[in-house]
Image (spheres, rainbow, N blue to C red):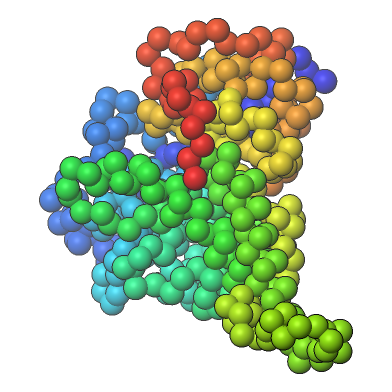
Amino acid sequence: MSDRYTVISADCHAGADLLDYKPYLERRHHDDFDLWAATYVNPHEDLLADSADRNWNSERRLAELERDGIVAEVVFPNTIPPFFPSGSLMAPAPTGEELDRRWAGLRAHNRWLADFCAAAPGRRAGVFQVLLGDVEQAVKEIRWAAGAGLRGGLMLPGTPPGSGLPELHARVYDPIWAVCEELGVPVNHHGGSASPPLGDEPAARAVFMVETTWFSHRALWHLVFGGVFRRHPGLRLVLTEQGSGWIPGVLDMLDYYHGRLVGAAGAASPSSQTSQTSQTSQAPPSSQASPSSSAEAKFGVGLAAGMGERPSEVWRHNCFVGASFMRPHEVPLRDRIGVDKIMWGSDYPHDEGTYPYTRQALRHAFAGVPRGELAAMLGGNAAHLYGFDLDLLDPIAAKVGPTVEELAEPLTEPPAGATSPVFARGASVRVW
């Protein structure tokens, strides 16, 4: 065993420079692309800065990540796909010709991403994009992406209020879950991808900060209560860059509601009522209220048959967390979350990410964690889920990875100039 950790970031971001998407578009879209690109105003400051090429400069990324101790990455999108009004896939859902143009833009990104990952064999697992407004097209794109080697899996868009899309628990999306299960494609739901538009008032950004993780978490209970994992037991869901400290409490809450709804609905069934009547025939009238009249019984009808296991069991069998810049207060919860479910991420190249202070961030959060557990959370779990070859990565990590001794030493002072929330005072506050 090497004295260094093999670190795989389960949350990085990349995308092409705007005009570099054109060769990946079908020729019939080239004139429209020229018109769109000529008038598009990029709303993201980090994509206009001198460091923007971190998104597409393959050699720069490899060098910077290695200096930071990271040998491989799961690559989520970052730059703007052609024909999109912003970087988000959220509301309102396009239709008709606009839907066709947006699909063309996403396919261009996915094809660029396949080439970008191929430029660093075994070092990148690309996460491809789809739209939910055309399930048949989504299934076709999933099959293409899996065949093109985009091992990072599907980035699942949100269905925020006002989108006009069916909610994620709807059966209309079953073909998507089925093809992902068939092909072993992970389904990733990234933080910030499910919030509704909040307007331009000064308070909008603050409200977004408060609410965005909650809207991102919704995918978990939608898919769980929707019975998606019962119908597709091989499906794997990854919730990325939305914290991890919330998971134990939310699972307790979901188990509570599952127990009440399923229990009450079961008690309201004819066979249960017959049994209860024989057992309580001598009881006082006040204790003989019909179970079928309770709100839980009505809300829980069909839930047990459609959903199956308790939410905490579904989490244990099917779900993972991309724990971006994991904070010190989250680490003691690792046993309740599941050490085998946690995949640390740096969020490179975002300002809230740990670059170029990843070693310090890992010391700050993980000093004192047993070596085997830390090796799993920093790389082993991601390697297993996304199919990274550790025989390829371990020799690289033996040269550039953080040492076991280094990460065992607690951090006494945060590095000057660090912008990641992992170092922030008050970082122990649990968001949702």
Question: 56 or 202: nearer the eye?
Answer: 202
Image position of 294 (left or right of 208): right
Image position of 227 (left or right of 46): right
Is residue 210 among the parts visible in the rendering? yes
**Residue 365 in the image, given as x and y percentages of width and height:** 60, 22
Question: 105 or 262: nearer the eye?
Answer: 262
**Residue 251 in the image, given as x and y percentages of width and height:** 64, 53
Say which residue appears at 72% left-offset and 22% top-offset.
369
Say which residue appears at 29% left-offset and 32% top-offset.
46
The single residue placed furthest to the left in the displayed view is 39
Say which residue appears at 67% left-offset and 30% top-offset.
332
Vertical placement of residue 132 versus 153, above or below: below
Is residue 61 among the parts visible in the rendering? no
Image position of 265 (left or right of 134): right
Residue 281 image-quadrant placement = bottom right
Vertical placement of residue 16 versus 267, above or below: above
Count of marks overlaid on the render: 0
The single residue placed furthest to the front in the displayed view is 284
Residue 209 image-quadrant placement = top left
Image position of 383 (left or right of 422): right
**Residue 69 in the image, given as x and y percentages of width and height:** 58, 20
Say which residue appears at 15% left-offset and 56% top-offset.
35
Residue 25 image-quadrant placement = bottom left
**Residue 117 in the image, given as x and y percentages of width and height:** 52, 42
Question: 145 or 310: nearer the eye?
Answer: 310
Question: 2 or 208: nearer the eye?
Answer: 208
Vertical placement of residue 359 versus 378, above or below: above
